[in-house]
Image (spheres, rainbow, N blue to C red):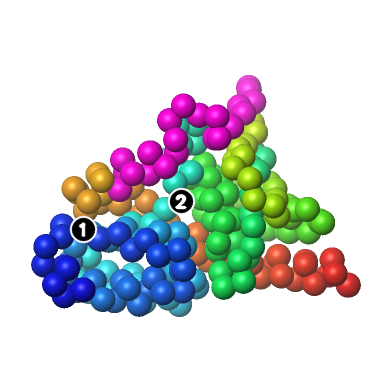
Amino acid sequence: VEEFMTVVDAVIIGTVDGRNHLDWFKKVVSYSKPVFIDKPIVMNSGEMKELINLSKIYNTPVMSSSSLRFSDSVVQAKSADIQSGYFFGPTPRQEQMPGYFWYGIHLVEMVVTIFGTEVEKMKVETYKDCEQIHMTFSNGKHAIIRGENEWHNRFGATLHTKENVHSLRLWEEEKPYYAGLIEQVIQFFETGVSPVPIEETKEIVALLEEISSLCSKQFLNYCI
């Protein structure tokens, strides 16, 4: 790592195992070069607090994000006055990264991009093929996430404004949402300014923890 860091301008921590992201970050943070960390950035709020503290001590810019928040349709919806939404997509589970830390984070980031992180109430219902998460926000807006157990590539949403209904079918968009992420990462490397504030990422981790806890309780009740 020491030799590597002398010849690079920025770092991507791209391991798919979120459990080792903080350890890798500790190896490179002291060089004060921009660091992009693949989702999930870390596995709990305690690790997130430590990562933020280290980034501040060494003045190291950090970015972490799902690619879905940079799809053209999600970016456009962000500027609309969306009142409520129904989001759907695959949420296959992975034992080492339980709950929504593995794949559900994509749907959560779509919701947060449009509605923010000020969730006032959250309810989870578990079914044989999916779970549904109903989020109510402090401003009265609300969203439902349908997380489907089986893997597929169909991420989307139905969004309601006061006057209209918008349908998002991300898998059919001409520009892949991953291309949108790469554009943002390159800009982050050039400017050192993340398009996703680290405090927002911290709040997303807290939401993932709450969802994981609620899903576990509902799954046990469903089994009983």
Residue 26 picture quarter: bottom left
> Which of the numbered marks, if any, corresponds to residue 116?
none
| Residue plotted at (25% across, 44% down) | 187
Magenta range is: 163-185
The vertical placement of 34 against 160, above or below, is: below
| Disc nearer the start of the sequence (1/2) | 1
Q: Is residue 134 left or right of residue 105?
A: right
Helix, strand or loop at disc 2? loop
Helix, strand or loop at disc 1? loop
- Taking depth in this image into account, of 42 and 15 the one nearest to the observer is 15
Q: Is residue 63 left or right of residue 187?
A: right
Quadrant location, the C terminus = bottom right
Q: Is residue 146 left or right of residue 188?
A: right
Q: Residue furthest left?
A: 6
Q: Residue furthest top?
A: 163
> Which of the numbered marks, if any, corresponds to residue 10?
1
Identify the residue under disc 2. 66
| Residue plotted at (66% across, 70% down) | 213
Q: Residue 108, image x and y in percent?
A: 56, 52
Q: Amino acid at mark 2?
A: Ser
- Taking depth in this image into account, of 34 and 119 the one nearest to the observer is 34
